[in-house]
Amino acid sequence: MKIFTVQQLAEADKVTIEKQGITSEELMERAAGLVFKEIHARLNNESVPIKIICGIGNNGGDGLVVGRLLIEHGYYVSIYVVNFTKERSRDFLSNYNKIKEIGAPWPTLLKGAEDFPELHPKDFVIDAIFGIGLNRPPEGWVADLIHYINASGAFILSIDMPSGLFSTKTPEPGDAVIKANYTLTFQAPKLVYYLPKTAEFVGNYQVLNIGLDYEYLAAAPAEAQLIDKEEAKNLYIPRKNFSHKGDYGHSMIIGGSYGKIGSISLSAKAALRTGAGLVTIYSPECGYEILQSILPEAMVIIDEGEKELKNIQFEPEPDVICFGMGAGISAATVKTFESLLKKTKSPMVIDADGLNMLSNNKGFLKLIPKNSVLTPHPKELERLLGEWKDDFDKLAKAKEFTNKYEVILVIKDAHSITVSGDNLYINNTGNPGMATAGAGDVLAGVITSLISQKYEPLIAAVFATYLHGKAGDIAASKLSYQGMIAGDIVDNIGAAFLDLFKNDDRGME
């Protein structure tokens, strides 16, 4: 699913109005009508106090339409207008007058803190103060009103965007932003729904298709792509009946050190579970018996170092090399990593201590094979890119980094984001139970496996991140967030593949 900028959505509104021969007010009625239908379907005329707090722009106009429709269907509704300026949008004014036409009480004007409505934990509050076009933080008594709403304990539903939340920057500490329980947004989700410092304000969300012009949206370049089940299906490459293990590539997993052999075993097992034809683990001598015992499906090559990697040598070269898990950053290991970078031509997957070595030796960055995949968690990313001002600055720096070094970044987080050049791919699977030791090692193995199976590295990174998250979701459904360990993610990779085509006539072919 495409994610668009505010400017693109505004243009889509204009194109839709022109091509469909409707007015902006009719488009507002359509959009707000869908919000009403969602609320009505859930409340089903339940006797709950509904308090709608409207701004004086088009988001407020949406709130007025929703209020009118709720009143017409017998709900107990109080409408309040945040009267912070004399300016009003045309569609707001039109819908303001329609409240009077149905015989309902006119909305109460809020002019300061003394006018704040009484709010209680059992209230249902609809936030329609500011929309997606907000460009400066609320101030004065309006900011106080937002803080007051948040503190009420009421259930808060925001229309399109929680009021006070920007679409292009992160709020500063103390800024007034509605913390919604639920957000109903129009046509497409917004980038801020998935970023660490902004997602918390959105709560759960639902996208309402308001019928904006399809041709315009199809042609418009996306600010980002949201990767969910339908998108992941299109990335899957079916297997042929007449094939053998050589058709699915040779993955090599290099890493480990004394006491940290488990990490490479997780990566290797994940690579096998994802379908790599052959997997070789390259390990210090101390890992030999462990690896041969716990993972008989993998081949094992031993480095001359007993407890650390000292001199990586192997033949022939595999289709893809995954490096770094549990490797440590000793001088000998750093030296042999540099040698590996110089002689390896195929794309690599670099994780964990491999990333730490790159951060500590920035000259290594220019040695990374093109189209390699780097998989940092937030701290590893910061060491690679330097500090950032906010999540938007982080993404800008990540784009610059991938353009400069011609690599792919998978920024691991609640919604992991794959960055390639100026393109962003946001993963929509995964859960808090995956915040556990070894989960990143599993992801590195899944990416490696897909590359060995001839997926393009970018596709492999995007698809692997989806599968990894879905395997975690399936594991959590059985074990709880707290009960999960990284091995459970590996054990459910097969189920994640099966889920792609569940209830789909195509099957996995």
Image: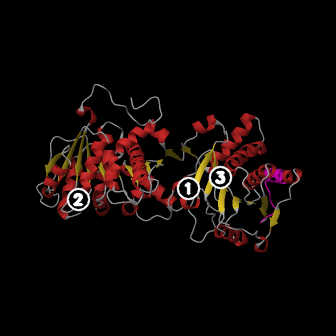
Identify whether 242 is placed above or below 291: above
> Percent position (x, y) of residue 19?
72, 34
Mark 1 near mark 3, Cβ–Cβ under 8 Å?
no
Q: What stretch is highlighted in magenta?
A: 84-96
Circle 3 sits on which residue? 160
In the rendered structure, the answer to whether residue 268 lies left or right of residue 392 reads left
Circle 2 sits on which residue? 327
In the rendered structure, the answer to whether residue 374 lies left or right of residue 308 reads right
Q: What residue type is labelled 2?
A: Ala
Q: What element carries label 1?
A: helix
In-front residue for pair 377/291: 291
Q: Which amino acid does label 1 sit on?
A: Val
Quarter assignment of residue 508: top left
Q: Which of marks 2 and 1 is nearer the N terminus?
A: 1
Q: Residues within 10 Å of mark 2 (few under 14, many from 20)?
A: many
What's the CA distance linking mark 2 and mark 3? Answer: 46 Å
Q: Earlier in the sequence, mark 1 or mark 3?
A: 3
Quarter assignment of residue 499: top left
In-front residue for pair 146/103: 103
Q: What residue do we see at 69% from left, 72% from top?
A: 144
